[in-house]
Amino acid sequence: MAKPIFINGEMFELPAEGTKEGLKLPLPFVQQYIDPNVRYEETSQSIILTTKDKLIHFKTDQLTGSVNSKPIQLHFAAEKVDGVLYLPIDPLKELYGVEIQEHAETGAVILNKAGDTVRMGEVPSNPKKPDKTAALRTGPTKHAPILADVGQGSKLRIWHEVEDWYEAQLDNGVVGFIRQKDVELKGTITLAPMQEASETIELQEPVHMIWEAVYNKNPDPGKFAPMPGVNVVSPTWFSLLDGEGNVKNKADPSYVRWAHNNNMQVWALFSNSFEPEMTTSALASFDNRFRIIQQLLSFAKMYKLDGFNIDFENVHTKDKDNLTQFMRELTPMMHEQGLVVSIDVTPKSNSEMWSVFLDRKALGEIVDFMMVMAYDEHWASSPKAGSVASLPWVERSIRRIIDEDRVPPNKLLLGMPFYTRIWTEKAEKGKMKVTSKAVGMKTVQDLIQNNKLTPVFDSKSGQNYVEYKENGATIKIWIEDEVSVKARLDLARKLKLAGTAIWTRSFASDDIWDIIAAH
């Protein structure tokens, strides 16, 4: 190769192109050794690089690009050579802190990454035998062929030890084995690590967030009961309008003023409208994704928002990577504006459209918070009556995300239902027919009082439970009340989670907020 690339003493299968400031590295190398998330979109010829605080975008054969939507000038353009995309070295140096050493004679390119530590050695001087050299061989034995006679004072990178030999590399790129007794160790060289983006979250833990379900009309917050303990509200204001990335807006500035006056942050919810085909189109290209991001940023400024809660559901599994990429592009732009970024995820299951499309591990590395919607264990049309969210099931759901996906507990919010389902079981034509309807806490309290029922504690679900007969049917209710809410709050504390997220304010009974405040 004219321009072989070496990293950690190993040569990559593809060469570099250009030289000095015009040096370019092949995309497969960049993805394997520098950042696996560097993305190239063939249809638009877009190259996208992201970190916690930067989104860089440029196109092949163009000398202009952008950093966080601000224009930049490139000295050298990305280009295709023999079907392989090559990226200019400048943005890679800036974004990832890579260091390049290029040898003038052999063309060898030796690359180190920010934070790398390299062990150094030198063939010592021998005044009595100034012409004596040390042999660099093809293998760790004196019978192996000699690759180079290494002169006194020559520096080597030491990669491995093999018995009495070092696997070492010369500045010209040649890698071989040299006897340890012929080398004097000279310590290590450590490249400065890249500075992490500063943390944008200023909210005191624990977070207690409520979702505000907004359908056709915004509620009047002046009529709300006091909500002590709640420090974040997430109204469902923004949703995907079409496959081109346009966003529907239902925001209400008076609601934001009310929240801020009551010391609450507003993390407005943005959903994909739960439309899978529209979602596929909207996430498919950088232009569409960026159109969404620009609109959300504009809305954040317009309404003085503190953050966003992203809620994508009913998504094709084929769109998994595109959703993760959307969050990679969204987050640095949001952070630059001081906005909190959170995303909703379901408990892990085999459901293609509701669970499998979520790369929880990758998402957990990107966002500030992840809300685990730990409810609908038994859903509206479930063939079997049961709790919306039994405590053992909730704990298993959270632990799986912590243990299997390595999402830090201090990023997780436990999604708590303030609704329950009234289940009706009735025999029809020899079969048991099961139906349900979702109701809030106050409805259940009134039902228990009006029917003079006495709830009993169900240790299996960790909830109070009532059952009674009505019109030949059996009615079953696993109750959401002070007992279940306390248990969930205790669970969040036990697992050292960031806090809780409640669906929704409108389902709450007025007395439940004091339980939140007490935790």
Image (spheres, rainbow, N blue to C red):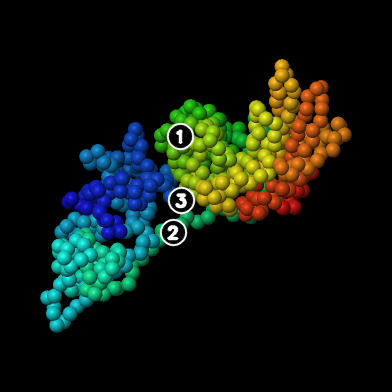
Measured as percent of width and height from the top left, residue 280 is found at 46, 30
Mark 3 residue type? Asp
Q: Position of residue 270 (x, y in %)?
A: 56, 37
Q: Is 351 left, or right, of 469 in this rendering?
A: left
Name which residue type carries label 2. Answer: Gln
Q: Is residue 419 left or right of residue 162?
A: right
Residue 223 visible in image: no
Q: Which amino acid type is marked by label 1? A: Asp
User: From the viewer's perspective, is residue 468 above or below residue 397?
Assistant: above
Mark 1 residue element: helix
Secondary structure beneath disc 3?
loop
Q: Indicate the position of residue 370 as horizontal and vertical percent values.
A: 57, 45
Circle nearer the viewer, 3 or 1? 1
Residue 301 shown left or right of residue 27 in the figure: right
Please tell me which residue is depicted at 75% across the width and 23% down the height of the picture.
426
**What residue sits right under mark 3 in the picture?**
53
501 or 79, nearer to the observer: 501
The crowd level at tag 1 (other Cα within 10 Å; few <14, some 14-19, many 20+) is: some
Residue where numbered disc 1 is placed: 319
| Visible residue check, residue 378 | yes
| Label 2 SS | loop
Indicate the position of residue 181 as horizontal and vertical percent values. 24, 75
Q: On residue 399, which mark appears?
A: none
Comparing 462 with 419, the one in front is 462
Q: Which mark is residue 195?
A: 2
